[in-house]
Image (cartoon, rainbow, N blue to C red):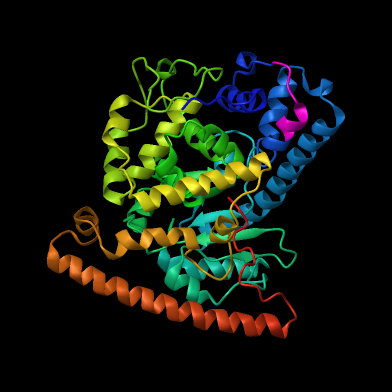
C-alpha cells in the first residue's frame, strides 16, 4: 500500500531531520495553520521557530499560526526556567547527601543534546535513583515544598509495590517530580538491572550541579523504553506506510528525534546516510544505504544490552524508524541483530486499532468508542487496559525470559514463575481495590472528583 504525507507533514519531518542545517529544508507553499496545529502537540515550537527564523520566514507567517507557535515556544521556555531552578536545587541537595541521581530525558536531553533547555523540557522532572535511596530523595523534595499535593494520588505503598515511580508536585501543581526506581512496571518481560545501570554511570554536570550520566547504550535504552511505554503500538506497527502520520498524530515526533540526535551526535561525520526523500511514498523495510560508519557508540554493547534486558523488539522497531524517517546512521548489522518478532494476531489487531484511533482523532474523523475507553489514561490503575496484553507472555514466560530472569529455563522454572506471577497479580488486585477505596473516601471527604479516570501522568 502506498501512502503520501501532506506537504505540511512532510515539512515537519524535514524540519526534524535537518534542523541543524536549515538551509537544506524545503519551503513549499504551506497551510501554516495546519503546520502550527500539528507542530505544537509534537513539542516542536522551539525547534520550528528556530528554523523559520534562520530561513527569514518567521516574520512573514500569518498572524494566527505565528502567535500559536510563539505562545507554545514561550510556554516551553517558561517551564524550562521554572523546572531548571527546582532541579538545580534538588541536585545540589542530593549530591550533598551522597545520593546518585540520573536525570531522564526532559531537561537533560534539552541541555545536553539540543543545547537549549527550552527545546523540549517535558511536563515533569524525571529522575532515576537507587531503590534504597527513594526515601531520602522524597525527603529532599518535601523539604523543598514539593510533596503529595495532587489529590488523585494513592498511597505510596501502592506505587512502590506495583509501579515505577512516585509523583510529587508543588501545591500549585506547576512543578512535578517523578522519582523513578525503574523504567517500567514490574509485570513486563523486561529484565533491566537498574542497580547495574546506575553503577555504570559516570560523573557529569547539569545546570551547574553534579549529576550521574548514563552510558550511551543505557541512555538509548532509557529513551527507547520510555517511547514505547507511551507508543505501545510501535513494535507491531513500525512497518505501516502511514506510521509517519501516526507519529505526528500521537504527538511523538520529538521522542524519536531525541534518540536520533543522541546517535547522530555520537557518530562520525562520514556516517551520515543518504537523505530520505519525503516526496515519495514511505516504504519501511527498505534501508537507506550507509557509507562507512565511524561511531563512538558501542553498537555491540547496545545489541548485548537489548538481548539481556528483553528490549530487542523495542530497540529494533525504534531504531528502524529513526533510520528510515530521521536519517539516523545505524549500521545494517545492528538492525539485523535486533529483529522485531511477529506478535500474535490478537495483539497485532489491537495495536493497529490503537494507531488507527490516533490517526482518526488527528484527522478529525470518528474513532471507536471502545478504543477510547480502552486507551484512556487514568489514576486508578498501574496497568492501563491496553497493556493487559502483556500479561500473557508474563504468566506463560518464554525460555528466553526465564533465562534472563532466573539464569535458567525449563519446566520447573516456568512453573515457579507462573506461581509467583499469580501471587503478584493477586496482591496487585487486592491493593488496587484497597487503595482505590481509600482514595475514594479521601477524595469524597474533601469534595474532589472521585472518578477513576482522572489523569495520572503529566507527560515526558
**Residue visible at 37% across and 56% down?**
194
Residue 63 lies, with reference to residue 26, above or below; the image says: below
Per the rendered image, the range of residues in magenta is: 28-36
**Residue 43 % position (x, y):** 65, 40
User: In front here: 153 or 230?
Assistant: 230
**Residue 351 % position (x, y):** 45, 48
**Residue visible at 43% across and 48% down?**
349
Q: How many marks?
A: 0
Q: Is residue 376 magenta?
A: no
**Residue visible at 71% across and 43% down?**
76
Q: Is residue 29 magenta?
A: yes
Residue 360 lies, with reference to residue 92, above or below; the image says: above
Rendering quarter of residue 446: bottom right
Residue 232 lies, with reference to residue 159, above or below; the image says: above
**Residue 50 % position (x, y):** 70, 27
**Residue 226 % position (x, y):** 48, 49
Rendering quarter of residue 16: top right
Residue 227 in view of the camera: no
The residue at the far right in this view is: 63
User: In front here: 269 or 447?
Assistant: 447
Residue 245 lies, with reference to residue 373, above or below; the image says: above
- Residue 400 placement, left or right of 302: left
Rendering quarter of residue 370: bottom right
Residue 239 in view of the camera: yes
- Residue 371 placement, left or right of 42: left
**Residue visible at 40% across and 19% down?**
288
Amino acid at each position: 500500500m502506498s501512502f503520501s504525507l501532506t506537504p505540511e507533514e512532510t515539512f515537519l519531518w524535514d524540519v526534524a531531520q535537518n534542523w541543524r542545517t536549515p538551509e537544506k529544508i524545503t519551503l513549499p507553499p504551506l497551510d501554516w495553520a495546519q503546520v502550527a496545529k500539528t507542530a505544537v502537540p509534537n513539542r516542536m515550537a522551539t525547534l520550528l521557530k528556530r528554523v523559520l527564523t534562520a530561513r527569514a520566514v518567521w516574520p512573514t507567517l500569518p498572524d494566527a499560526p505565528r502567535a500559536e507557535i510563539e505562545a507554545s515556544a514561550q510556554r516551553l521556555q517558561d517551564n524550562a526556567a521554572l523546572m531548571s531552578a527546582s532541579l538545580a536545587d534538588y541536585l545540589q541537595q542530593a549530591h550533598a547527601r551522597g545520593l546518585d541521581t540520573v536525570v531522564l530525558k526532559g531537561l537533560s536531553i534539552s541541555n545536553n543534546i539540543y543545547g537549549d533547555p527550552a527545546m523540549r523540557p517535558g511536563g515533569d522532572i524525571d529522575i532515576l535513583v537507587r531503590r534504597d535511596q527513594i526515601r531520602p530523595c522524597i525527603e529532599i523534595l518535601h523539604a523543598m515544598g514539593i510533596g503529595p499535593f495532587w489529590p488523585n494520588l494513592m498511597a505510596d505503598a501502592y506505587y512502590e509495590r506495583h509501579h515505577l515511580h512516585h509523583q510529587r508536585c508543588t501545591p500549585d501543581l506547576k512543578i512535578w517530580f517523578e522519582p523513578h526506581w525503574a523504567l517500567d512496571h514490574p509485570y513486563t518481560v523486561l529484565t533491566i538491572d537498574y542497580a547495574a545501570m546506575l553503577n555504570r554511570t559516570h560523573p557529569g554536570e547539569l545546570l551547574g550541579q553534579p549529576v550521574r550520566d548514563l552510558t550511551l547504550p543505557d541512555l538509548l535504552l532509557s529513551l527507547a523504553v520510555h517511547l514505547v511505554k507511551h507508543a505501545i503500538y510501535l513494535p507491531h506497527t513500525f512497518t505501516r506506510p502511514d506510521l509517519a502520520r501516526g507519529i505526528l498524530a500521537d504527538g511523538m515526533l520529538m521522542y524519536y528525534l531525541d534518540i536520533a540526535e543522541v546517535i547522530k551526535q555520537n557518530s562520525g561525520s562520514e556516517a551520515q546516510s543518504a537523505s530520505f526523500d519525503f516526496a515519495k511514498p514511505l516504504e519501511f523495510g527498505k534501508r537507506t544505504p550507509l557509507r562507512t560508519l565511524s561511531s563512538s557508540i558501542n553498537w555491540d554493547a547496545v545489541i548485548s544490552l537489548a538481548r539481556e534486558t528483553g528490549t530487542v523488539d523495542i530497540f529494533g522497531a525504534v531504531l528502524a524508524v529513526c533510520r528510515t524517517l530521521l536519517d539516523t546512521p545505524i549500521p545494517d548489522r545492528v538492525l539485523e541483530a535486533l529483529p522485531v518478532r511477529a506478535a500474535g494476531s490478537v495483539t497485532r489487531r489491537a495495536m493497529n486499532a490503537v494507531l488507527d484511533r490516533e490517526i482518526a482523532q488527528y484527522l478529525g474523523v470518528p474513532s471507536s468508542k471502545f478504543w477510547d475507553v480502552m486507551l484512556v489514561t487514568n489514576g486508578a490503575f498501574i496497568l492501563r487496559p491496553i497493556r493487559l496484553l502483556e500479561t500473557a507472555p508474563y504468566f506463560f514466560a518464554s525460555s528466553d525470559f526465564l533465562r534472563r530472569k532466573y539464569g535458567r529455563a525449563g519446566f520447573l522454572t516456568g512453573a515457579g514463575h507462573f506461581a509467583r506471577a499469580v501471587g503478584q497479580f493477586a496482591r496487585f488486585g487486592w491493593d488496587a481495590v484497597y487503595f482505590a477505596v481509600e482514595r475514594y473516601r479521601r477524595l469524597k471527604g474533601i469534595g474532589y472528583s472521585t472518578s477513576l479516570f482522572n489523569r495520572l501522568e503529566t507527560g515526558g
